Amino acid sequence: MHSTTVFPSNDPRFVPEPEPARAAPGSENLPTMRVPVALPAPAEPFPAVTPPPRGRLAPLSSAPLGIANLSGSDWSSEWDDDGESPFPGSRRAPRVGDTVLGFKLVGELGRGAFARVYLAHQESLANRPVALKVTLRPTHEAERLARLQHTNIVPVYSVHNDGPVQVLCMPFLGKVTIADLLRVYRSDPSRVAGRRSTVARAARTTLTTDSKSVPASNGRSGAPRVPVWTWDSADPPPIVGDPRAVVQALVQLAEGLAHAHERGILHLDLKPANVLLADTGEPMLLDFNLSFDAARPDRELVGGTMPYMAIEQLLDMRNRGTGTLDQRTDLYALGAMAFEMLTGGVPFAPTAKGLRDIDGQVALRRQGPPALRPLNPAVTPAVEAIVRKLLAAEPEDRYQSAEQLRTDLERQLNDQPLRYARETSVTERLGKWRRRNPGLTLRLMAACLIGLALGLGGILHQRAEATARVGAVEQARTTRAALDTVRLDLILYGDKTTHERGEKRAEELLAAYGLPGDADWQKRPEVSRLTEIERSALTADLGELLLLLAQSRWQGFETRPESERRERAAQAWKLNRAARTCFDANAVPAVLDRQAALIAPAVGEVVDVPNPAKVPGAHTEFIEAAFALMSGRYATAVPLLDRAIADQPAHGAAQFCLAYCRQQLGQYTRALERYDVARVLLPKDPRPALQRGAIYGLCKKPALAEAEFTKAIDLDPGYAEAYRARGLTRYRLARADEARPGRAAAARAQLEAADKDYTCALERGASPLHIHLLRAAARDGRDPVGAKADRAAAGKLTATTEMDFLVRGTVRVFENPTGSLADFRSAEELNPRSLVALQNQAHVLADRLKEKDPRGALKVATRVVEFYPEFALGRSGRAVLLARLKDRDGAHKEIEQALLLSDDAEVSYQAACVYSLTSATNPEDKAKALEFLRQAVRDGYSNLPGLALDPDLEPVRKSKEFEGISYAANRLVK
């Protein structure tokens, strides 16, 4: 059976692939195996998390089947619309009608020199409309946008990289930008500045149509443009020329900028074309392509758009990035945009000289902008003062932060005196005062009476209430900030220490609100003082946490002693019942009742499970996905997580879980991309780096893997699994160096480093039996005394836990397969759902025993498929056994299911074995066998020397096609 032999890890969150060890007494084939995952669990639908070991990996450079290759080498350095296809062999950008990475392009929204933005339908998510930005110049835009979650900033759903090409997927929120409104405003010859009726007439004109192509900047006919905007009474009102509407828009843009600036992100290309007017009416910042992290000293040279660039930005561009840019640079651009929105023209028009006239542009800016009121009489002196302060030549004379600007704008809207800009009009200030104080005499009398009645006691009460509310809000914020880490600790069960940490922290967070014991917990001050929106978000978070903790208590129920079972069932039931109080009656997640039905018999209760109603929302989708992941149903979890992330892009745990599921399904490039997003959202969690290292290790990229494991250790120096993983990687690097002339010293250094990593892992609580054997392999030939001591220490350890039996069974699988089989069965007794134990039992029964037992192996493999129906390698291994037993139809059905689940090279190889075996009686299967074999080799199947020895390939071995494949494989090995 071509099952994956695995080597146990004490952390099933990580699946590295160790290299073969040197032959030594007691460890002849030490780590030829892959890391396991296995833990006790109850029956479906709520088993413990048991991530299966991955099969051998297709190289990261290969695109998944059916996906367009966007390799930048296939495009010219400029956008080229010639050619037949954007895929390999062409030199043009994607066109409307193409399908790119699962996105159907239906319209072009905009283009630039190195990027185009398309309206697309995401086929994997019910053809939802998205905006797809395709660029030849990959930037840090996605990483920065992942840190920015704000109503007035267009978020990013996902990022996809293919060579030098980067594709950003964003929500499609509308087609209109402020630049579109300006074009309509300028196109109306009858317009009068400051009059809404004229602007409204202009705005009713549709800018472009579906049916006609628009000329591209390079003179070619471009793709059909999406209609930009048609305004009617149901749409957002026009903004240009209306001072109050402009100020309202600026308030929202200032809030978005303040959010970005607080996180160290500068935009640096603010202009009307980069402000989307969403269909809901909010202005939203987009295109952070030129933005940079102000905290990074190694920023790129940035450009901008000349009419909106401050003096310091112009000088920075002339001096090749040696200038000083900060948040006031963005505020200047916002001022230039405000000037244009109020008057229809920019304050400083560029000349035909362009960049050659930087000195002239600087001189113009130092003179100050033209007066606004002659250009638009509706602009008040206070509004002009705000714009002129934004456009001050020297940064110290501008608003010093977006928050200051927002304050003045809001005070202007509320008829209050400006706080930061100087108001010169006494008339306007008196008008504001009158509007704030209608019926002044009556109001003063009422105020005096109220003041006398309430007195100081009322003031003190208000202060106390305000302080208490601030405390309640801060407690809710702290709870939410801790959730992502706790979620992952509870969902990714396997490392006992980490799981216990998650349970303890979950209990602390719940206890702070009186849960699960207080039936009236929602009346507590820390809940009741929140606004309705804040309270709704908090209760949903707590309900989710209660369900996850209940599942944690229930895990492994059937394998525990009777007394412990009763206690844990009672705890799980109490938590489940408390969770119900967190949801409205019409918004209870279906998983809550399913969990209750599972626990109820153990506590003597009866539960009627109603027909589940679909409850939309990120919480429901994430909870369902979490339980699917816990039961190994990764393909089921993916669309649920996609929908949760679409609703809450900043959900760090959902981003990590989506990456993890894609990793388990063999979608490694997409997993790496999603781990990148998770790393930004979970900056202190070492797990995204650890999993990225695991993928690179499986991809035969040990140097990249080592770097990722080092990042994980830097984040958490006490993380034993990261040391163990880095030790395995350094061992692999040492073996590669030993095979190269002149690299003996480097190999020795790597082995010494691996030795130290294993020691650190042992000191931090890693499995002693496991680490002693690994360290012994690293010491062979370099420190024979130490190696002998490690093996002696391992020999003295008694196997008592599932992990111990897995380790010992793996080590002696060749020299003592009968004893190895007994160890794997002992591990299964401790955990009936242990994937590693079951996989290895099938492997020993089918291939290692002197008297092979294929039917016994099939029974075990069938249990694997029943427990983990979406584990592709389990299905492909079972298909091989069925083929050996001459069940052609059953074997073909099983391998077809495996191929649907994964495009892993290991699955392709096992498909080749299945069709090879069935070709002995059905020669027509031979062609398929050879095609799958070619695919496996092409996609990076790693055991190429085994092609000449595998008995399952015997029926096709004598063919010329096999000889050609074998020859190519041998060339690759050499």
Image (cartoon, rainbow, N blue to C red):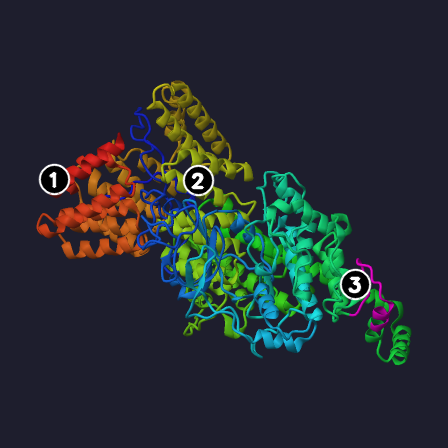
Given this view, does label 3 or label 1 mark the residue nearer the observer? 1
Q: Is residue 58 left or right of residue 328?
A: left
In the rendered image of this protein, does residue 15 appear above or below residue 182?
Answer: above
Front residue of 723/416: it is 416
Q: Return the x and y of residue 909 as percentages of the image width and height.
A: 23, 45
Q: Write the residue at 70% across / 50% down.
A: 328
- Crowding at mark 2 (Cα within 10 Å: few <14, some 14-19, many 20+): many
Separation of disc 3 and disc 1 at Cα? 87 Å
* Mark 1, secondary structure of its residue: helix
Mark-to-mark CA distance, 3 and 2:
51 Å
Q: Quadrant of the C terminus?
A: top left
Nearer-N-terminus badge (2/1):
2
Q: Are marks 3 and 1 in contact (CB under 8 Å)?
A: no
Q: CA distance from mark 2 to mark 1?
A: 40 Å
Residue bearing the label numbered 3: 464
User: What is the quadrant of the N terminus in the image?
Assistant: top left
Label 2: which secondary element: helix
Q: Is residue 418 magenta?
A: yes
Q: Amino acid at mark 3?
A: Ala
**Is residue 168 one of those drawn in magenta?**
no
Which corner quadrant of the image does residue 813 belong to?
Answer: top left
Judging by the rendered image, the residue that carries numbered circle 2 is: 693
Checking the image for residue 960, the label placed there is 1
Give the residues in magenta. Answer: 415-431
Whether 916 is drawn above or below 736: the answer is: below
Location of residue 937 (image quadrant): top left
Question: Looking at the image, which is closer to me, 729 or 720?
Answer: 729
Visible residue check, residue 641: yes
The mark nearer the N terminus, 3 or 2, is 3
In-front residue for pair 157/796:
157
